[in-house]
Amino acid sequence: MKLVDVILLSLAVAFLIIGIHQIMTIGFANAYWVVMVALILFFILNLRKRNKS
């Protein structure tokens, strides 16, 4: 994994953890955007891995 991939994975996990916390405290409707940012980062990481091979 290159540095960019590690950074993308770290950001995705961090946003996922923040999203779960926000869902538990303020509800899903207000934390939806955080979860979507995490999913977008996971999708970008997956796309980068597929294009390498």
Image (cartoon, rainbow, N blue to C red):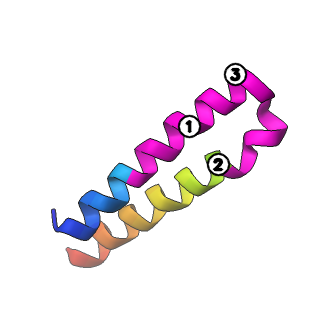
Q: Is residue 10 left or right of residue 52?
A: right
Disc 3 secondary structure class = helix
Report the residue that reaches farthest toward the left.
Answer: 1
Label annotation for residue 18:
1
Tell me the residue at 61%/28% (across/down).
21
Determine crowd level at label 2: few under 14, some 14-19, many 20+ residues with C-alpha closer than 10 A: many
Residue kind at label 2, given as amino acid type: Val
Report the residue that reaches farthest toward the bottom.
Answer: 51
Q: Which residue position holds label 2?
A: 34
Disc 2 secondary structure class = helix
Which residue is more in the foreground, 16 or 50?
16
Marks 3 and 1, how far apart in space?
Answer: 10 Å
Query: Is most of the magenta stretch helix, strand or loop?
Result: helix
Magenta stretch: give its range: 11-33
Residue kind at label 1, given as amino acid type: Ile
Q: Which residue position holds label 3?
A: 24
- Rendered view: 38 above or below 23: below
Determine crowd level at label 3: few under 14, some 14-19, many 20+ residues with C-alpha closer than 10 A: few
Residue 50 at x, y = what percent?
31, 70
Mark 3 vs mark 1: which is more N-terminal? 1
Dot 1 and dot 2 residues touching (CB under 8 Å): yes
Q: How many marks?
A: 3
Mark 3 vs mark 2: which is more N-terminal? 3
